[in-house]
Image: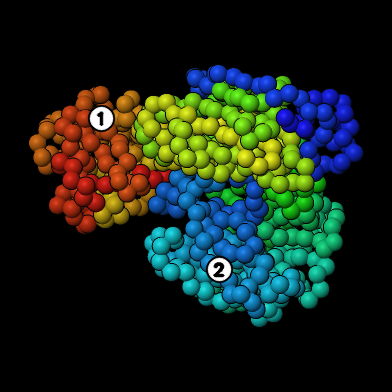
Amino acid sequence: MGTRMHARTVALTLLALTLWGCGPQEPRTEGLPDTGTSEAGLERPLTMAGFYNVIMQDGADPWVYQHTDGYYYFTKTTGGDVSLWRSRTLTGVDAGERKTIWFPPASGPGSKGLWAPELHYLDGKWYVYYAADDGNNANHRMYVLENASADPFQGTWTSKGQITDSTNRWAIDGTVLVVGAEKYFVWSGWEGTVNDKQHLYIARMSSPWTVSSARVRISTPTHAWETNTSPQVNEGPQVIVRNGVISLVYSASGSWTDNYCLGLITARVGTDLLNPASWTKRSTPLFRSGNGLYGPGHHSFTKSMDGTEDWIVYHTARWQGAGWTRNIRAQRFTWSADNTPNLGVPANPNQPIPLPSGEPSRSHYEAERAAFANGPRVVAETTAAEGSKLSYIDTTASYVQFTVSVPRAGEYIVAARTGNGTSGGPWAVHTLSINGGPGSDFFIANSGWNQWGNATARVQLLAGNNTLRFTKKEHYAEFDSIDVFPVNTLAGGVIADGTYRLISKLSGKALDVGGCSAADGADVIQWSYTGGECQKWRLQHLGAGYYALLAAHSGKALDVAGCSAADGSDVIQWPYSGASCQQWLLERTDDGVSFRLLARHSGKALDVGGCSTADGADVIQWPYSGANCQRWYIQAP
C-alpha cells in the first residue's frame, strides 16, 4: 500500500511545496488504496509531426554536428571522459548509439574535470576539443584529440596535447571558426590568474591543434545581465555565418543561476577578426529564461535532417533554481533582417513543437488509455498532453502497459513523457518489458512533479501489435504519454519529401543531368558534386514507398528511356507523366545508411555503368546485386 501522494491533490501539497522550496520533492500525505486497474491499451495512436521539447532528460553543454554520412553526432559534458552519441535524427540522440572515445590519464594535467567537448571535422580528419584540469579548477586548459578514420566511432583517437596561446592562461569552451581558408580558435578564459572574470578570446590557427598568433580579447562582461554573478562570465562561444555576417553567440552570467542566457557579438567576413574593433556587442540578451524554463545556455547550432531549417540545441535548468542540474532541448530558429539569428524564447515545454523537417512522424499513445493494474490511476493535470496523467505507480506490482503497432519489424525509439519528484532527488527506475520478454531498466530523471522530461529506450519490435510494459522498480514516476518512431530516418519506408542530393556510395559523386541541360531526354550521369541545381533532386512520395525524382533545374523526372525493362537501359530526364518508369522505390540497404532505387516498371536498380568512378560515367538500370555502384546516399544539398 502506498504511503505517499503525488503532486496533484490538495492544498496541503501546495503548502508543502512552498515550504520545501523549488527543488524536486516528494509531497507527503496519507496513503490511498491501490485499486487502479484498466484493461484498456488497444489505443489507436495519434500520428504526430511534433514532439515535447526535451531531447535529453539529463545533461549540459550540448554539441551537435551533422555530418555528410547522414548522422547527427552529439556530445556533452560527462565530467570523466569524452563520449559521443550518434543518431539519424536530431530528436533521437538520447537513444542514439554511444561510444566513449577517450579516458584521461589517472592523474596530472588534463586528468579531471572534462568539460564541454566539441567534435569537428577539419581537413579530412576528426577533432575533439575539450577542457580539463588536474583536480584544481585554476588549472583548466584546452586539449585536442584526433582521429583519421572516416568514421569517428572507428579508428584510433590520439591526443594532440594542449592547445594554447603563449600566455597559457585558464581556458575552457574552445571552438573553431572557419572563414574561407582561415581557421580561428575561440574560447573563454581569464586575463590573469585570478578568477574574477571570464572573457572571450580569439587567435589564428596554423593547424587544427595549434594556435599561431597572440590571443585577442573580443568580449568581456559589461552589461548588467553579464555582471550579475561573481565571477562575471562570458563563455560557451558558438559561431554561425550568414550572408557575410559572423554571429558569435555566447553564454553570459553564472551557469549555476537562473540568469544564465545567451548574448551576441558580430563581425563581417573580410574584416580583421583579430582586431577587437571588428566586433560589435548587442546590448540585450539574445535568448533568456521564459515559458517556465530557466537558465538557457551553452548551445550549439545545427540543421534539420533535410537541411531546410536552422535549429539551436541548448541546456536549461531542470527546475527553477536547479543550478547545474540540467536537461537538453532543441528548437527551430529564424533570422533577423540583419542576418543575425532570431532565437525567440524557449519553447513552451507543455506544448508540442514541429519536428525538424525531414524527421519521421511519431505514433503517440496516451498513458491514461493504456492498460494498468495494481495501483495506478488517471489524475487530471493541466500540463499533461490531454489534461490527464497516470499516477500512483507506487508498488513493485504496479505497471502500465501500452499496445503499439508498427508497420514493419525493426528497431524503434520509445520516448516516454515522464515526471519524477521523489524526495531527495533520485532517478526512478522502471522495468521495461517488450512482448512479455525479459525486462531492462528504464531510467527517469528527477526534475519535480509535472516538470516533464522524455525518457528513452531503443527497442526491437515486431510488425503489427506489440506490448510495452513499464513496471515500477525503484522510486516514483508518473507517465503522461509515449511516442514511438523508427531509429532509421524512414517512416514506414518513406523519406520526407524535399530537395536532396544523391551521392554514389562507390565514387562519392553526384547524380547529375549532363551539361545541366534542360532538354527532354538529357542524359543522367555521375559528376563530382559542385552544388549545381542539376545535381539536386526533388523527391515526391507517390505512396507505398515509391517516389518521383525531379531535377531541380528543369523540373523533369528521372526516367528509364523508352520505359525499357532491358538490362543496361539508359536513365534520362523526361517530363513527368506518372509512368511506372518514372517511379522509384526507395529502400534502405543493409549498411543502414545508403539506399537502393528500384524502377517500378522493371524492378531494376539505379546503377553507375560498369561501376565506374569517373566523372561523366553513365547511369543506367541493372539488376540489383548489392554493389556499391547501386547504393546511394540521400543527403541535404
* In this view, 586 is above or below 378: below
State the image quarter where residue 187 is shown.
Answer: bottom right
Quadrant of the frame with the N terminus: top right
Foreground mark, 1 or 2, reads 2
| Label 1 secondary element | loop
Q: Who comes first in sequence, dot 1 or dot 2?
A: 2
Q: Nearer the viewer, residue 566 or 528?
A: 566
Q: Looking at the image, which residue is at 49% across and 19% down?
A: 42
* In this view, 240 is above or below 348: below
User: Residue 502 vs residue 19: left or right?
Assistant: left
Residue bearing mark 1: 583
Q: Nearer the viewer, residue 420 or 47?
A: 420
Q: Which percent across, then down, holds residue 406?
A: 41, 29
| Residue at mark 1 to residue at mark 2: CA–CA distance | 50 Å
How many labels sit on residues?
2
Mark 1: few/some/many CA within 10 Å (<14, 14-19, 20+): many
| Label 2 secondary element | loop
Mark 2: few/some/many CA within 10 Å (<14, 14-19, 20+): few
State the image quarter where residue 281 is shown.
Answer: bottom right
Q: Which percent across, then down, holds residue 199?
A: 74, 65
